[in-house]
Amino acid sequence: MKFNYTSILACLFVLIFLEGYGQSNLLNAVDPIEIGQKNIDQKQSDTDSFLEYNLIDDRDILWSKIVYEYIDLDEKLNFPLLFPTYDDPNERIRKSLWRVIRENIIDGKITKIYQGDEDNFNYPMTNLEAKEKISIQLEFADGSSIPKEVESTDISGYKIKGMWYFDKKIGEMRYRLLGLMPVGEDVKQDEELDERNTNLFWIWYPSIREVLHAAEVYNDKNNATRISFDQLLVSRRFNSYIYKEDNMYGNRFIKDYKKPGLESILESERIKKEILDFEQDMWNR
């Protein structure tokens, strides 16, 4: 049996290209190199799909509540934020949310970074400090060391800070994402320890929207139509639970007054219901 090696190489090229860039323009391509290229209408549509945050007059906010949530990457609905988890910089592939964030910090495109132990963005970090968080030297007892980067497999979730508010001008409940914090394993700690999760740093979300809009998320419903990470996050296409809210008790954590487990979950759902019920109550008045 004879093999046509030219055909085999062409097929391999197409498979690699499809993995890297998806299947947009697949049906129109007359040459494999055209797969993934966007026409003028698609490029214009992508530009239009990025919506700047509207200016909101504080006088138009009838009601608001700031909530802090955790997005667990072990949940299937949140897998688009996690995968792919291989971070080889030489591979022309889709990227995980963490890889997009890490690469843009290294390139200096993400600069509004703040200490992870305070969620009001009062303590900015320098680019060097942020880089030290994501790339460290592992020290060994014999005095040797090796470089170690926080990789996609080390990220277990994301904390987000956002505000729900009722805009009386348009008569709608809206959500505004304000902050994003990767939560990952502390690569400095002993692997035998049970608790290795650590808060890396807060990022002021409005400052990274354009960066995240340039990175696409895999769409398992239609591989030819994808959305950006910004679209996914702003439209809340993820599952999360509330771990804290701004309140009169000093913005205490739910775990501080409810037992971990079922009680904390029920309290998180109660807060969500309170937010959703406010809009419904407005229309029933």
Image (cartoon, grey):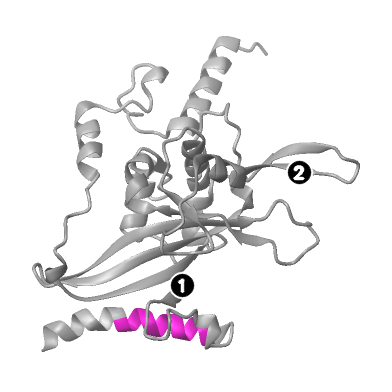
Amino acid type for the residue under numbered disc 1: Tyr
User: What label does residue 184 carry, if any?
Assistant: none
Instruction: Please report the residue visible at 48 percent of the width from the left and 57 percent of the height from the top.
Output: 181
Q: Quadrant of the C terminus?
A: bottom left
Sequence-first tag of 1 and 2: 2
Residue matched to label 1: 241
- SS assignment for the magenta stretch, majority: helix
196 sits left or right of 16 in the view: right
256 sits left or right of 168 in the view: right
What residue range appears in magenta?
A: 263-274
Instruction: Please report the residue visible at 19 percent of the width from the left and 82 percent of the height from the top.
Output: 280
What crowding class fits label 2: few (fewer than 14 Cα within 10 Å), some (14-19), or many (20 or more)? some
Say which quarter of the image contains residue 167.
bottom left
Query: Considering depth in this image, is 4 or 10 the residue closer to the camera?
Result: 10
Residue 81 visible in the current orientation: yes
Residue 114 location (% of width, % of height): 47, 54
Residue matched to label 2: 138
Q: SS class of the residue under badge 2?
A: strand
Up-down: is 145 above or below 80? above
